[in-house]
Image (cartoon, rainbow, N blue to C red):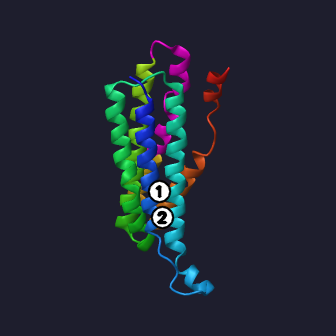
């Protein structure tokens, strides 16, 4: 199947998620610096979630560029990923106002964990669909970084019970980890 509809739909869902998140950030009540300072937790929550959505958008783009086409399995797994990404505005808003509370931080971690699991499933489905193209399949990769992320999310979620800020620290570190580029995708440009 042609992958362009999948890409366009995914881009639309991701753009809507970002829009909903920014609409959840309130305007300062006054014009003083302390009014803006009071909004720092929601702004930082938005920033972290924006970075996560951006990371998924960039990596989704790379994955689909490496694939020659998509099949029904890839379509459904992609919807699974989009479902979890669409929940980011909800948990972002919750954490923005309760960043020191265990349950919102744990739920944020569950959504991030499920995004990572979904992305790994998408990666594996695309790798399977490209079995006839060994170079493309190898570029799509095994998902080691995904597996490492899943492990850290799984550790951060229970950590959020005694230490919500400790769990948030892990979420930030994982976002920074995903900024490291994957140079395998450059192999397809040659």
Q: Can residue 100 be seen from the camera position used here?
A: no
Residue, disc 2: 22
- Image height of 133 relative to 72, above or below: above
x and y percent of residue 78 in the render?
A: 37, 37
Q: Can residue 172 be seen from the camera position used here?
A: yes
* Quadrant position of the N terminus in the picture: top left
User: On the picture, is 156 further left or further right than 186?
Assistant: left
The residue sitting at the right extreme is 190
Q: Quadrant of residue 92?
A: bottom left
> Dominant secondary structure of the magenta stretch?
helix
Range of the magenta residues? 131-151
Q: Residue at x 45, y 62 (%)?
A: 21
Question: Which secondary structure lies at badge 1?
Answer: helix
- Image height of 109 relative to 187, above or below: below
Residue, disc 1: 18
x and y percent of residue 87 in the render?
A: 36, 55
């Amino acid at each position: 199947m042609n992958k362009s509809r999948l890409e366009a739909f995914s881009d639309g869902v991701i753009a809507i998620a970002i829009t909903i998140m920014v609409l959840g950030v309130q305007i300062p009540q006054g014009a003083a610096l302390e009014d803006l300072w009071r909004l720092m937790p929601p702004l930082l929550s938005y920033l972290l979630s924006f970075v996560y959505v951006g990371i998924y958008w960039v990596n989704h783009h790379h994955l689909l560029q490496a694939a020659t086409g998509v099949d029904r399995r890839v379509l459904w797994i992609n919807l699974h990923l989009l479902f979890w990404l669409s929940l980011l505005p909800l948990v972002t808003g919750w954490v923005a106002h309760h960043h020191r509370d265990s349950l919102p931080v744990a739920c944020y971690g569950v959504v991030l964990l499920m995004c990572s699991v979904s992305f790994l499933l998408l990666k594996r489905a695309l790798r399977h669909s490209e079995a006839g193209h060994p170079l493309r399949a190898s570029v799509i990769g095994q998902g080691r970084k995904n597996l490492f992320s899943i492990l850290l999310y799984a550790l951060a979620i229970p950590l959020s019970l005694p230490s919500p800020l400790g769990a948030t620290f892990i979420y930030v570190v994982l976002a920074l980890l995903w900024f490291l580029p994957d140079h395998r995708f450059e192999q397809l440009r040659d």
